[in-house]
Structure formats: C-alpha cells, structure tokens
Image: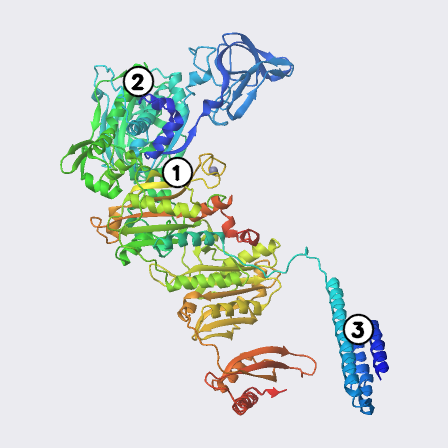
C-alpha cells in the first residue's frame, strides 16, 4: 500500500504541473481526493491492514493528501496570478486621451466681482441694501442736493419715465431710502443696475452696475472713510495695493474725493492698463453732505457719515483686460466660460 | 480746459516742472485730464524767410523755394500755394523731428533737391489737419534762424484740466494760477489793469437798458479808431496753445481775457448798433443768425442783446452776424456782463450751441469779475495799440454781490476730518485762498465772491483738507459700536438659486432691462396680454430700447439666438433679473424673475429637472407642475406651469415653433421663467435635520397599463392618497409603448417604497395598501396591472 500511495502522489503531482486552468485542477482534486477518488478508495482498503500498520499507513495517506492538496492550491494560486497579469496587460489604456467631464456652468464675471466686493464689505459689518431702479426724481436728484436745472443732471444723461420718475442714474438714491428706514449706526452697500442715455459702444453702455456704500454713525470722520476704502482696496486688489485720494466734487458729499489704486497690473510702475500713470481710478467718495443727511431725516449735528460709489464694469474690465463693455451684455458663452 | 504751462508761470513764481505742477494740483483738487507736451518732440525746426520762389519745371503743383535760415540758404520744395517771397515760415531742417516722431530728411522731389520741409500748423501739432490751410505764415518781424518752439512758446507744454461745476473760478488761467499759488504756498502776481482813456464819455455814444434780472450785471466800454489786423505773435501762440483759433486783434483780445480771467467778453461793431442803444431782454420767438452763419430759432426762455431795432446777440452764448467785428470795423462796444447760469445752459442746450462763453456762464460767474475783465481788456487794447479807449463806463449792477461769512470751530474741523491741524495752519491755508479769517472761539471766514461754492462749515473743511493734503489725513477703522452684517432671507435664497443654476451646468447671462415693444409680437402673445402693459421711457435711445421689460423671455431668446447663430449650439443660460410691472402707481412693481434656457442635446425633461432641483434646493413647499396648453409662447403639448401653494409661480416648456421662427432659430429651445418672490414665499431656508430611518423599507414594483393620455401625476396622486402615510417615495422607472402594448396605451412602471417611521411594516399591512392602490387605479383611471 505504501508503494501505491507513493505512486498516486507522484502521478498527481505530475498531472498538477500539466494543468493550465483552475478548472483542470478541480478535476484533479476530484480524481484523487474526491469521495470516489483514488486516495479515498485506497483508504477504504485500510481495514485489511494489521492494527500495527494502520496508523502508519494512515499517517502516510494523510501526508499524501496534504501534499496533493497543497500542490493544487499552489498551482491554483499561480494560475490566478498568471491570469490576472494577462488581464492587466490586456486592459492597458491610453491615459493621454481626454477625460470625461460633467458640463460646467458659471456665474457672470460681473456677479463674480460683485460677490467678491460683497464678501469684503460683509466682513466689515456692512449689510446689503437694495432700491428701485425706476426711481423718483426726488431720490435720484433732489434729495441728493441736485435740484432741477443743476448741471450735474446734464452730465448724467438721464432716461425719464415722466417728469417725476427716472431710471436711476446712480445707486446713490438708495442712501436716502436707507436713511429714511433705519436709525444709525448704518453700514450698507447697495449694488445694482444704473442707467445713462449713452449709446452703446466699446466704452459706454446705457446700463451698467454700481456699488454704493454708506456709513453713518456718531464720530465718523474722513479718516474712517480713508481707512475703510484703503482696507477694501487691499483686499480686492492685493495687500500691496496703495490708494490715492484726490479731491473732487460731488453734490452729495463734502468733502469729496476720487480714489485711485496703484495699478495691480504693473504694481504702479506704469503700463498700458494704467496709461503709464501707475494709478487706476476706481471710485468716488466723500463725507455725506449735511443736506443729504437732513433729507434722510438724520441730524448732521449729531451724526456724520461717508458714502462711496464704484463702477463694477470698469473694475472687471481692468482686472481681466476686457476692452469692450458690450461683451458683458452679449452673453456669448465663449465669453462667459472664461471666468 | 487747456492751460499753457508758460502762460500759467506768468502769474506764479515756481521752479517746478510741468508734471510736478500737474501732480500737485491734482492732489489739491484741480483734476488734470492730460499733460500735453506738444513741442516736446519738435526738434531742429527753425524760422526761415522765403527769399525766392519759382515753379518746379516738372510739376505744376510744386514750388521751389530758397529759404534763408540765417546760417545758410536752403532749397526746399513745397506743395503749398499760400506762400510768397518775403514770408517767414517754420522750416524743418534735414534731420529734424515733428510731433508723432516724424523725421524729416533731405531728398529729391521730381528731380529737384529739397533740403527740408516748410511746415503747416497741423504738421507742428498746433491745429487739426482740416482747420488750417497751407504753410504757417509768421509775422513779418519774426527773427529768422530761431527755434520755432521759442517763437511759438511751445517749450512749456499744456495742462488740460477738468473743471467741476462748482468751481467757475477755476475756469481760467488766472484761477488755476490762484490754485497753484495756494498749493505751493507762493505768491500770486497781480494783473495789470491800468489803461489810459480819452476824455470823451461813453454815455454820449451809447445807452444800455437791462430788462431782465437774469442779467445780473452789464458793463460796456467803447474802443474807437481801431486798426483791425492780426494780434501779436505771442498772443496768437498762447491762444492756439489754449485751443482757440486767432482771428483778429479785437476778437483775440476778448478771447485772451476770457481764457485768462474766465469772463467772456463780446465786441459789437458800433456802426451796426442802431439807435445807439443796447437792450438786454428776453427773446421773442424769432429767427436769428449767429456768428457761425447758422440761422437759429430763439424763444422767450433765452436772454438776448438787442439794439433799438434788432437782436444782435444771444446773451452769453454767441453774437450775431449782423454786428460782427470785420476788417472795416472802426469802433466797438465791449460787453462784459454776467448772465444767469441755468438760463445760459438751457439756451445753449436748446440751440445746440455750446461755446467757450456759454460753458463759462453756465457755471454762474462772479459778477465782480465783470469789471476786472473789462479793465484788463482795455489795458490790452491800449498797450497793444489796437485802439483808443473812450472815457467812462456803463455799469448796470443793481444787486452788488458782497463777500459772505462762514463760521466754524477748528475743533469741529479736526473732529470731522480725523486730523490734528493747528489753528495757525488752518488760517494760513485759508489766506492762501484769499479768504480772510478772524480767529475767535470760531474761525470767522470772509469768503470772496468768486467762491460761492464755500457756504457751510463742511465746505471749509474741504478747503483745509485739500490744501493740508488728503494723503496726510490718517487712515482709521470705523469707530463706534460694532455692527453685524445682516443678510436677508431673500438675498440668501437668490444665492441658492445661483448656485443651483451653476450646478445645473448653466452660465449666467445679463441682459438689458429695456427692449422694443415689438418683442411682444415676436413672442406671439396676444394683443391684450398683461405683459404688454409696460413702463415707457419718455426719451429712449430709439424704439428698440423704449420700454422696461415685463418678462425676461425675449431678452433670453435673443441671447440664445446670438449663441446659436454663432455656432455655440449646446447652450444653457440663466438670468436672475428684474421685470418692471406697471401697477398704476408712481413706481412699478420690480420683481426678480429667474429665466432658464437650454438648447442642444436636451429636451423638456432636462429643463424640468433643473426647476425640480431648484425646488428641492429651496425646500419649496407644495410645488406642482400642471399642463399648460394656452401659453402662446410655448409648444401647446410641451408646456407646464409651476404652481406653488396653488399660486402661479412660473412657466416652462419648449418654445413654440412660430416664436423660434421669429428669432431665426431652427433648433428647439426650452425656456422657463419663474417668479422668484412666489417661489421664495414657500421656501424653507432653515432646514431641519430629520433622523435617518430606523426601520427597514420595503420596495414593491408595479407595472400598469393605462391610456396614453393619462398623466403620470394622476397615477402618483392616487398612490399617495391611498398610501396612508406609509409611502416614502414613488419612483417612475419606465414608460413604454410599442410591442405587446395595444395602440393608444402605455405601460408605466413604478417602484413604491414603503416605510413607517415608528415600526417595521408587516407584509400584511403593505399588501393591504398596495392592493387598495391597484384597485383605485383600476377604478379611477381604468388602469390594468401587468
Ligand atoms: Zn499699470
């Protein structure tokens, strides 16, 4: 019997080596180790052996079974590895081919810039206010110290609905509406559309966006105006940005100023964007005129404040080097996708 | 306003370069538009005398000149026809440079040697190409061989200022000089106003009557024995640099004084003044020919100057041809007057005639300037030998304007500016602006009449701030109690809408708020549609921009059209914008609408999906879609309205082919317009956490055979109604028509997910509900279970 067991083991090991699939190995397992397998049938004949021989042969038989079983497992593992390697090599792809994308959408560049501005001012405790675009002459002009026949009315070519109603030419009327509805301290920005009767060309648009700002409290000074706008400019255009306040004239502020920022393209050295000056004009501002405070129902002997207004299109055009304002309102997706 | 730098330097002694002065004045409040250094580029251009001219043998239109430039005589060929022997002209030598970097070299013209070029005003950058003709002829006494820049005073350059409406006093070179002196802290030179006059009296020649208070002052002087001719070279050069064309000595003097002092003057030919009388009055409706030869319609809102018979000038705007100074003028009436700003501005606007004079008068000039200017002009008439000043003056000035006073405490100024300027410095600054200050508890400031813009203490603060330097004022944070930014619910929701639209692969569009009333026909809506009740602009930029929009759809279609015609075929756009609804009040109802449009490889359900996502993102309560067959903008079978809490919140669908045709579109376009306020009313922004389910869900499928026209919403409503609160979700996963399905029917397949919050559902319980659904569907919709 020993010889027979030995023989089975050798035979099986050879056959295992010849196998090339795990299926063939399973057949071998059945042939030798299965319920009707060769090893089993030999073991069945163990009863004929002497009691002394039985444990010895039994031990050998178990060793044979184990050897065959291990050989099958090993062979199975090898075949699996081989198959995996073949599959991996077959599955090679061209990783330089383009990726599959979900289509993107995006916000309008003016909205994006406005969001940035809003975020900066919200961080400084400003709320967002709104006012009507079709506005009473009173709010757009009279209450802002621009009476009928004031030359400023000519400078801002106004669209009229009727004698008393205009398309607002500036976001400043929101100042008065806010003052009428809110007690100081007031800190708001009011972004929105404004209208001037300019025929559209590369640098003019009958519709554009302004962002108005208003701060009113006790003890608001020109220094706080400078501090606030300087901080805004640094956050908007970079920490290195410097500001220059130039005296100017607006009917609704006194003193008034225009603000330049150091050119964020050339850092103030002079380039095409800043026309060589190193500075870019971005906004107008000033201390709220006492007549305007009074029009808003606020006592100028108790409170003071400052206001500012900036043109959104202008800032975005300079920032991205856009040379035609009409592009903002054409809505060509090839333009919109760039931001 | 163009200020020649050398002219400016005649009144202030400063040793600064033009750019330094421009920078400093900018910082003290005179806004510089541009520094023009015209002469800067001109090099090697000298004066030369033409000593001989002859026709070019090979070219009719060319002349060969021998030009004496002092050191040598040069042969130069020119095409100009206005020169003659003896003329003194600017000569660009070989190797010279003209404005724009043009280099001049010697060469041959049709075989004749030419060693340079004779220059015109345009070539020297002094005038526009079309305003002058031929070579610039200099006056006879011009020295030759001298740098032209020296002769024409081009060495200094010009500063162009933007003059704001409040600073009429700065609309003059002397006014800018005053600002310059104040800015640099130096002295402003006095003008020479002295002149000799004869012993006649003007009142023997002329009477003046002012009939309107809109003429605040009228002064007249007369000059006789006038020799009309060109004004001196230096005066012509200065006028040209300031952008005014020299005409003759009389007109040039009036213009010179206007530029210098900001007071427009007018000279009438005395011989054309009938009745020896000047009357200032309101015009009647009449036609009048101004100096520029144009006949204009006047009306009674305009002030005119007339003689005993006729109108001779539109006051403050322009004189008339009928009293113009000409070659033969011998005696003039010199008018120096003050006219109301608003009246002048409106007249000038009505006439479409904005002149150097009107642009000054409209800023409301100081009536006390009238006298200074008239004296200055007389000084020039006399000293330049143009004529003899007649003795005496006519001056009609009933309400003399006196200096006014403003009181302000220095402490208030410092508190207001956030500065710490001491009182002496404040006083010094104000003195530099010709304001006298008395220091008591307060500063009592005497404001000169030319500074009507300084009325209140804030104005004084500005004067001090700008001379102190805006840049030196410290920068501070806002003091006072901290304010918390408030963001309203609506603002937050608008942000959510934007985020959701971008996440739906859409790009944001912005379109004009106004459009043409014709768009309503283009989008097919009926004549009596409420949408047509728009707000009209009284003075639009043409019909295409004449009404405020009542719907975003036409603008959006236009944006889609633009993209599709430009081959951007796969487009998805959205706009959040206002419509302006005429509600019969002073102001319209301005409402935010959301408009979404998609085209390309998409259908109705892509659009609906976007709106459904929005409803989910805003947690809108009770939102339903209902078939809409009557909206003419849309395909009658592919349109739905959005109902929110039973209120109409918008519409979505495929655009009607007729409308597409009107927009030249051959591709299908899907558009939705949602009324955001209605949507927001039902939105829940504060989402609450809902615990994850504790008990298992049971999924049952159900396939039904129903008639084609049965809308799935009807099926789902029944399912939910019968669901007794244990249906968590209904998922439609298949709609099928075709094989095995009879004509006119469709198969719809659902997964119904059952779950209870508080227990595990038993099969029995579910079966009961499920069966009741089937039964109800069979009864109500004639559905068959498959
Ligand atoms: Zn730059």
Residue B70 drawn at (x, y percent): 49, 8
The reply to whether the C-beta atoms of the residues labelled 1 and 3 are less than 8 Å apart is: no
Mark 2: few/some/many CA within 10 Å (<14, 14-19, 20+): many
Looking at the rendered image, the disc whose residue lies closer to the viewer, 3 or 2, is 3
- Identify the secondary structure beneath mark 2: helix
Along the viewing direction, whichever of A61 and B111 lies nearer the viewer? A61
Front residue of this view, candidates B352 and B468: B468
Q: Secondary structure at mark 3?
A: loop
Q: Could you tell me which chain the residue with mark 3 belongs to?
A: A
Badge 3 density bin: few <14, some 14–19, many ≥20, Cα 10 Å: some
- Circle on res. A285: none
Relative height, residue A271 to residue A289 (above, below): above
| C-beta proximity under 8 Å, tags 1 and 2 | no
> Which subunit holds the residue at mark 2?
B
Callout 3–callout 2 Cβ contact below 8 Å: no
Are the numbered discs 1 and 2 placed on the same chain, yes or no? yes
Percent coordinates x, y for residue A127 in the rendering = 35, 57
Q: Is label 3 within 8 A of ligand 1 (CB to nearest ligand atom)? A: no
Q: Please name which of the two marks, 1 or 3, marks the residue nearer to the observer.
A: 3
Report which residue position mark 3 lands on.
Answer: A21
**Residue under pointer 1:** B352
- Disc 1 to disc 3, how far (Cα)? 100 Å
Position of residue A306 measured from the top left corner of the image (x, y, whole percent): 30, 47
Quadrant holding the N terminus of chain B: top left
Residue located at (45% from left, 55% from top): B514
Q: Is mark 1 within 8 Å of ligand 1?
A: no
**Residue hosting label 2:** B381
Rendered residue at 23%/53% (across/down): A298
- Quarter of the image for the C terminus of chain B: give it: bottom right
* Gap between marks 1 and 2 measured at Cα: 32 Å
Chain for mark 1?
Answer: B
CA separation, marks 3 and 2?
A: 122 Å
């Amino acid at each position: 019997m020993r010889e027979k067991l030995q023989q089975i083991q050798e035979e099986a090991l050879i056959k295992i080596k010849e196998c090339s699939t795990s299926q063939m190995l399973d057949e071998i397992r059945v042939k030798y180790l299965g319920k009707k397998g060769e090893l089993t049938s030999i073991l069945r004949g163990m009863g004929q052996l002497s009691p002394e021989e039985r444990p010895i042969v039994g031990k050998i038989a178990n060793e044979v079974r184990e050897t065959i079983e291990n050989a099958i497992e090993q062979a199975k593992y090898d075949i699996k590895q081989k198959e995996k390697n073949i599959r991996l090599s077959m599955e090679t792809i061209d990783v330089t081919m383009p990726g599959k994308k979900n289509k993107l959408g995006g916000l309008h560049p003016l909205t994006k810039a406005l969001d940035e501005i809003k975020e900066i001012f919200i961080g400084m405790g400003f709320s967002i206010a709104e006012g009507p675009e079709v506005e009473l002459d009173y709010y757009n002009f009279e209450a802002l110290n621009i009476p009928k026949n004031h030359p400023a009315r000519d400078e801002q070519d106004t669209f009229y609905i009727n004698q008393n109603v205009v398309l607002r030419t500036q976001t400043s009327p929101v100042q008065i509406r806010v003052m009428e509805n809110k007690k100081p301290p007031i800190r708001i920005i009011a972004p929105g559309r404004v209208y001037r009767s300019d025929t559209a060309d590369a640098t003019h648009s009958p519709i554009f966006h302004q962002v108005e700002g208003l701060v009113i409290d006790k003890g608001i000074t020109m220094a706080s105006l400078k501090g606030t706008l300087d901080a805004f400019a640094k956050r908007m255009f970079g920490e290195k940005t410097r500001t220059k306040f130039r005296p100017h004239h607006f009917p609704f502020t006194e003193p008034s100023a225009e603000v330049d920022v150091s050119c964020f393209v050339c850092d103030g050295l002079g380039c095409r964007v800043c026309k060589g000056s190193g500075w870019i004009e971005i906004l107008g501002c000033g201390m709220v005129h006492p007549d305007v405070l009074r029009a808003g129902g606020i006592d100028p002997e108790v409170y003071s404040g400052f206001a500012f207004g900036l043109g959104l299109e202008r800032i975005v055009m300079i920032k991205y080097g856009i040379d035609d304002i009409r592009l903002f309102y054409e809505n060509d997706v090839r333009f919109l996708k760039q931001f | 306003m163009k200020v020649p730098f050398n002219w400016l330097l005649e009144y202030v002694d400063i040793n600064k370069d033009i750019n330094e002065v421009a920078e400093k004045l900018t910082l003290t409040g005179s806004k510089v538009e541009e520094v023009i250094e015209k002469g800067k580029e001109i090099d090697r251009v000298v004066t030369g005398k033409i000593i001989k001219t002859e026709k070019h043998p090979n070219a009719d239109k060319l002349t060969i000149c021998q030009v004496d430039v002092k050191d040598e005589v040069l042969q130069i060929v020119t095409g100009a026809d206005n020169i003659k022997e003896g003329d003194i002209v600017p000569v660009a030598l070989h190797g010279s440079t003209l404005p724009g970097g043009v280099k001049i070299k010697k060469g041959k013209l049709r075989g004749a040697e030419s060693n340079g070029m004779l220059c015109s005003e345009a070539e020297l950058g002094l005038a526009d190409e079309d305003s002058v003709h031929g070579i610039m002829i200099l006056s006879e006494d011009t020295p030759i061989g001298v740098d032209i820049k020296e002769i024409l005073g081009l060495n200094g350059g010009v500063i162009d200022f933007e003059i704001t409406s409040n600073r009429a006093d700065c609309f003059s070179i002397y006014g800018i000089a005053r600002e310059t002196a104040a800015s640099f802290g130096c002295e402003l030179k006095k003008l020479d106003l002295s002149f000799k006059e004869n012993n006649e009296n003007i009142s023997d020649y002329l009477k003046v009557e002012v009939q309107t208070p809109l003429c605040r002052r009228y002064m007249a002087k007369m000059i006789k024995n006038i020799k009309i001719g060109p004004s001196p070279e230096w005066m012509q050069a200065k006028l040209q640099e300031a952008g005014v064309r020299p005409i003759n000595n009389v007109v040039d003097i009036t213009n010179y004084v206007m530029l210098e002092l900001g007071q427009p003057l007018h000279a009438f030919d005395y011989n054309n003044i009938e009745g020896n009388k000047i009357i200032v009055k309101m015009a009647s409706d009449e036609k009048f020919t101004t100096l520029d030869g144009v006949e204009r319609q006047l009306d009674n809102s305009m002030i005119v100057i007339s003689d005993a018979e006729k109108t001779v000038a539109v006051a403050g705007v322009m004189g008339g041809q009928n009293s113009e100074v000409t070659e033969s003028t011998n005696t003039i009436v010199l008018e120096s007057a003050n006219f109301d700003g608003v009246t002048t501005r409106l007249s000038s606007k009505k006439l479409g005639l904005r002149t150097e004079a009107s642009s000054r008068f409209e800023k409301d000039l100081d009536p006390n300037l009238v006298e200074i200017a008239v004296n200055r002009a007389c000084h020039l008439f006399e000293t330049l030998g143009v004529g003899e000043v007649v003795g005496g003056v006519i001056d009609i000035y009933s309400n003399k304007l006196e200096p006014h006073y403003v009181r302000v405490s220095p402490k208030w100024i410092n508190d207001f500016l956030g500065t710490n300027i001491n009182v002496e410095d404040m006083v010094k600054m104000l003195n530099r602006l010709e304001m006298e200050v008395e220091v008591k508890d307060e500063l009592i400031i005497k404001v000169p009449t030319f500074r009507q813009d300084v009325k209140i203490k804030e104005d004084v603060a500005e004067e001090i701030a700008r001379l102190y330097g805006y840049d030196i004022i410290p920068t501070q944070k806002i003091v006072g109690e901290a304010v918390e930014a408030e963001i309203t619910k609506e603002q937050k929701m608008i942000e959510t809408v934007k985020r959701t639209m971008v996440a739906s692969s859409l790009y944001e569009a912005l379109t004009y708020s106004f459009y043409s009333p014709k768009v309503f026909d283009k989008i097919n809506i009926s004549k009596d549609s409420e949408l047509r009740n728009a707000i009209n602009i009284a003075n639009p930029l043409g019909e295409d921009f004449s009404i405020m929009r009542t719907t975003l759809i036409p603008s959006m279609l236009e944006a889609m059209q633009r993209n599709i015609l430009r081959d951007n075929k796969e487009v998805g756009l959205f706009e959040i914008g206002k419509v302006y609804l005429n509600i019969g009040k002073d102001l319209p109802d301005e409402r935010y609408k959301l408009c979404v449009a998609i085209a390309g490889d998409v259908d109705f359900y892509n659009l609906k999906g976007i709106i459904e996502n929005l409803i989910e993102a805003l947690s809108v309560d009770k939102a339903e879609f209902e078939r809409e067959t009557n909206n003419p903008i849309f395909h009658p079978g592919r349109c739905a309205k959005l109902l929110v809490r039973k209120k109409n919140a918008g519409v979505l669908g495929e655009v009607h082919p007729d409308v597409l045709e009107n927009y030249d579109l051959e591709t299908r376009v899907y558009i939705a317009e949602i009324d955001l306020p209605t949507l927001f009313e039902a939105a829940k922004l504060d989402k609450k956490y809902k615990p994850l389910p504790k008990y298992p869900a049971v999924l049952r499928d159900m396939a039904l055979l129903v008639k084609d026209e049965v809308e799935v919403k009807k099926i789902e409503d029944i399912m939910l109604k019968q669901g007794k609160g244990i249906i968590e979700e209904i998922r439609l996963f298949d709609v099928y028509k075709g094989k095995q399905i009879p004509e006119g029917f469709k198969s719809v397949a659902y997964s119904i997910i059952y779950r209870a919050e508080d227990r595990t559902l038993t099969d029995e319980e579910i079966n009961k509900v499920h069966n009741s659904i089937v039964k109800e569907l069979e009864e109500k919709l004639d559905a068959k279970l498959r």
